Amino acid sequence: MSALNELYKEIERCQDCELAKHRIRVVPGEGPERADLFFIGEAPGWHEDQQGRPFVGPAGKFLEELLASIGLRREKVYIANVIKCRPVGNRDPLPKEIEACRKWLERQIEIVQPKMIITLGRYSAARYFPNESISKLHGKARKRGDIVYYPMYHPAAALHQGSLRKTIQADMLKIPEILAQAENLVQAQTEPQQLSLF
Ligand code: URA
């Protein structure tokens, strides 16, 4: 069994927070065992909880459109969430739920070894850039170690607000160039470094 499939089996058994009691399906994430791009959303919604797959509702449809704008299908990238079970009534995830789920995302990233982590929305941005607002962070790439972090607005927010929609579309279009640039910057950075190009 592949390392990811073994990990999914562990995640499916997880009872480390209250959300486990209410889920229909765990939504570990999906994608290739190795992928350059690793997208992190917030939490499963109703559709995801039903199907056990991330981003399969309206926000997922928009994410697929955004990926198509840079010539990618969703199967080519890794897609996960900060938490793996749906919060009841789609409420915001609680800090203790995010903390309980942290280990799973870390292990996914270790296995997939992405070159670029794209955070979608403020909960996943906060994992890497606590205390910074998404309105300042979005669309700017920063390198830590060998990974480039690139915050974007959440597709669900952008779906409902015309101005954010254009911003998220523009931010997505920058990804191929940032990825190309990331490959040139092989030296690990000890401090977060904003890439001068963007
Ligand atoms: N929103 C998310 O953040 N994740 C999903 O999987 C679906 C919607």
Image (cartoon, helix red, strand yellow):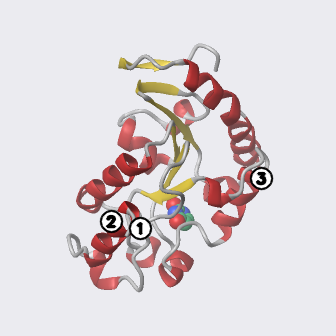
Q: Residue at x 67, y 57 (%)?
A: 63
Residue corresponding to mark 2:
7
Q: Quadrant of residue 129?
A: top left
Query: Going 62% across and 55% down the picture, which residue do you hit?
Result: 157
Q: Which mark is residue 28?
A: 1
Residue contact at pointers 1 and 2, CB within 8 angstroms: yes
Disc nearer the start of the sequence (1/2): 2
Residue 163 image point, x, y percent: 74, 44
Q: Quadrant of the N terminus?
A: bottom left
Determine the secondary structure under disc 2.
helix
The answer, for residue 63, to whether it is visible in the render is yes
Measure how far apart labels 3 and 1 are at the Cα level: 23 Å
> Which one is nearer the viewer's eye here, 47 or 186?
186
- Considering only order in the chain, which callout, 1 or 3, is on the residue closer to the N terminus? 1
Where is residue 160? Give x, y as percent.
70, 59
Assess whether mark 3 and mark 2 are in contact (beta carbons under 8 angstroms): no
Q: Nearer the viewer, residue 122 or 71?
A: 71
Report helix, strand or loop for mark 3: helix
Q: Amino acid at mark 1?
A: Pro
Residue type indicated by callout 3: Ala
Mark 2 vs mark 3, foreground winner is 2
Q: Is mark 2 within 8 Å of ligand 1?
A: no
Neighbor class of circle 1 (other Cα within 10 Å; few <14, some 14-19, many 20+) is many
Q: Identify the residue position indicated by label 3 in the image.
A: 68
Q: Position of residue 153 (x, y in %)?
A: 59, 46
Q: Earlier in the sequence, mark 2 or mark 3?
A: 2
Q: Are marks 3 and 1 in contact (CB under 8 Å)?
A: no
Compared with 14, 147 (above or below) is above
Q: Amino acid at mark 2?
A: Leu
Q: CA distance from mark 2 to mark 3?
A: 29 Å
How far apart are the two marked residues, 1 and 2, measured between alpha carbons? 9 Å
Most distant residue in the top direction: 196
